[in-house]
Image (cartoon, rainbow, N blue to C red):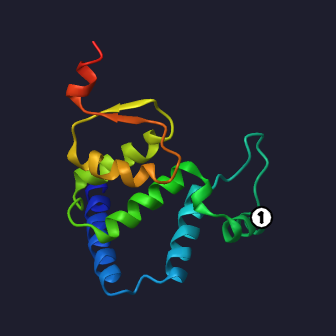
Amino acid sequence: MLEEVYERNEANLLRLRELTKQGKLTDEIRRRVDELLVTGSLPKSTPAGLEIGRETKMEYVHQVDVRVIPSLAIETAISNHEWISQGGADRNTLIDKFHLISALSHVDEILSDDKFFHRLYPVAEKTGYVKAKLLGNDEFVKHF
C-alpha cells in the first residue's frame, strides 16, 4: 500500500509539472490546493477535547493563508518549486521532502550532503520560517 502512495505521488508530480508548463495551474486552482492542504492538517478536536464543527473548520479554511503557518509555508514553497523543476519525483525524494519540511522550522542544524536537500533549502529559506542551518559533512566535522 505504501508503495502505491509513492507511485501516485510520482505520477501526480509529473502531471503537475506538465500542467504548470501548459499554464493551467491558475491562482484559483492553487488556492483550492491550499485549502485541501489546510483541511488535511486540521484536528478533529481541541487539546481539551472540544470537537471542532464542520462550519467552523470551513470558515477557517476559506480565510487562512498557508504562508503564515511555518510547516505549510515551507511545504507550499517546496511544492511550487518542484512543480517547475526537473527530477526529484521518486520515492526517495518524497521521503526526503517529508523529513525536510517537518524539520526545517524546528531544529538548529541538519547534517546532510544530499544534493536534493541542498537544492531545496534556499527555496524553503525564502519563507522566513527556516530555523535550521543545513550543513554538509565536511562543514560539520570542522566544528571539532
Q: Is mark 1 on a helix, strand or loop?
A: helix
- Disc 1 crowd, CA 10 A, few/some/many (<14, 14-19, 20+): few
Q: Where is residue 138 in the image (x, y as percent from the top left)?
A: 20, 26
Is 79 left or right of 28, judged from the image as shown? left
Residue 65 drawn above or below residue 135: below
Position of the N terminus, as image quadrant, is bottom left
Residue nearest the observer in this picture, 134 or 19:
134
Q: Position of residue 9 (x, y in %)?
A: 31, 64
Residue nearest the observer in this picture, 100 or 9:
100
**What's the residue at 42%, 52% (across, down)?**
124
Residue nearest the observer in this picture, 109 or 126:
126
Residue type beneath disc 1? Thr
Q: In which quarter of the image is residue 54?
A: bottom right
Residue 40 drawn above or below residue 103: below
Q: Name the residue under label 1.
A: 56
**What's the residue at 28%, 80% (across, down)?**
18
**What's the residue at 27%, 12% (across, down)?**
144
Residue 69 drawn above or below residue 18: above
